[in-house]
Structures are given as structure tokens and as C-alpha cells.
Image (cartoon, rainbow, N blue to C red):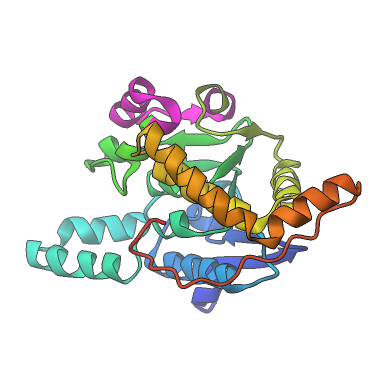
Amino acid sequence: MGTPSTADTVLAERRGAVLVLTLNRPERLNAWTYALEGRYFDLLDEAEADLDVRAVVVTGAGRGFCAGADLDDLAAAGNADAETLATQFPARAAARPRTRPLTLRKPLIAAVNGAAAGLGLVQALYCDIRFATPEAKFTTAFARRGLIAEYGVAWLLPRLVGTSRATDLLLSSRVVRGQEALAMGLVDFVAEPDQLLDAAVAYATDLAQNCSPWSMSVIKQQLQHSLDSTFAASVAEADALMLEGFQRPDVREGVASYLEHRAPAFPPLEPKAVDPKVLT
């Protein structure tokens, strides 16, 4: 059997205006590798530039969403000398950091079909909305592998579930299943396994058909900025953006379609050069 190509590590399928990405290493519960990472981020870049793609759904093939970093890669990192670690890992991060999904200007929705552990959990948290099955398993895993809270999860997780719950999840690395994850705010919706992907795609399709791409992009930006902002600064930013919005066709179309009782026809999101090192 031949070695799978890099393109096989993440599959892409168009469903109308929604791009469905499937992490595709089912024999390893879609464990994260540099090849998978590169392919996933390439596809996000393509989705960013494609005017016809208005939302993205990411899921996993087989029984898992993503079981975290591939153990072979972890073992290699654990055996590397300090000089190698100090040069290779920062170089990879400088090229395109693992926070790339946070810079996507279009809605990114996770359909968590199984285990989401460590880096796999982090990537799910980087999504805007999370769907999960009742039996999906979430664990930070880091403390049980001798690792620290990686890739900003110590900043992000308390903002989703609160400091006390985040502390519990990070220190214990205990497994949380779908319904508990829903109750604590770790996920937004729970669906049965045979309905999960369709439910996530239906949600994404509703956004694609009925919401302004520009509005959603700006709202994502506002949400990120507000996490480290004062209320007054958030209001000031909103006022400036509102004035900008009044000059755009989106507002006119949004009002007209409502008054005319028809579906809106919002213009696509204009391509924009994105600096992957900066969270916009």
C-alpha cells in the first residue's frame, strides 16, 4: 500500500456555499501532524479567497475528531535537543501559526464526532461554533502528557467556560462528554451521530444564505477585540464600524429584502490579504 499523499490528510467537499473539511487520518483518530496541518491551513486559505464559499465546517473521519498531536511527533519533540527545539519549532510557527483558524474571516464550525483531545480540542475551540454528539469526548490531555496548556488554550478556555471550570479541565485532563460539554458552554449544539454533520452544514447554510458575509466578518473581529477591551472602547469601535456599514450595499440589501419579504442577496466578502501572525 502506498503512502497517502498530503492532499489525502484533509478532504474537501462543497455543499452549496459551505465548504466541508474532513480531517482524514481515521486509523490514528485524525491525530495532528505537520502534513495534516499544512493541508488544513491551505484549504482555509483557499476558502478565504473563494468568493463562493461563505462558511466552513470541519469534522473528522471515522470515530474521532482529532486525538491531538501525533504521538510520534511528540516523541520526536521529547527526544530533541534544546538547540533543535529553539530553532525548528519557532520557525514553523513563524511560517503559519496554529492559530490560523482564528484569522479566518468566514464562519468556521466544528462538527465534533468523537475524541477531541489536546491540540484537537484546541482546534475545535478555534472554531466559532461547535456541534458535538452526545458521546463525543473532550479532554485537554496536556497535564497527563507532561505538557503545558498549549496554543493559547489557557487564555481561550476560561472565556468559554469560566476560570473555575477551565482550571478543572486543564489540571485534571478529565474526559467531558457531549451533554456535559453543552451544559458548561464548551459546545453550542448536540446532535446524534447520524445527524451531526447535516446539522452543522444546515447551520452553516443558514448563515451563508441569510447573513451578510461582511457583517459576519466584522462581528467576528468585534468579538475578538472585545475580549481584551473595555466597554467604552467596544462601543467606540462599534460606532465607527456602523458608520462604515451604512456606506455599504449590505445594509441596503438587508433592509430591502426584509421589506420585500424575500431572501437576501448579499454581496460576497471581498478578498483581503491576511497576515497569519495577526488576529484581526
Task: Report the side of 270 relative to 263 (left or right).
Answer: left
Q: Reply yes or no: does residue 198 show up in magenta.
A: no
What x and y, as percent, mark residue 51?
66, 71
To which quarter of the image does residue 55 belong? bottom right
Q: Which residues are magenta?
A: 159-181
What x and y, as percent, mark residue 100?
42, 60
Where 174 falls versus 33 (above or below)?
Answer: above
| Rendered residue at 26%/36% (across/down) | 143
Q: Nearer the viewer, residue 28 or 58?
A: 58
Q: Specify whether residue 213 is in view.
A: yes
What x and y, as percent, mark residue 56?
62, 57
| Rendered residue at 61%/61% (across/down) | 21
To which quarter of the image does residue 158 belong? top left
Quarter holding the C terminus is bottom left
Provide the major secondary structure of the magenta segment. helix
Task: Report the side of 124 relative to 108 (left or right).
Answer: left
Q: Reply yes or no: does residue 178 show up in magenta.
A: yes
Q: Specify whether residue 58 is in view.
A: no
Quarter holding the N terminus is bottom right
Where 178 falls versus 243 (above or below)?
Answer: above
Where 220 falls versus 53 (above or below)?
Answer: above
Q: Nearer the viewer, residue 206 or 56?
A: 206
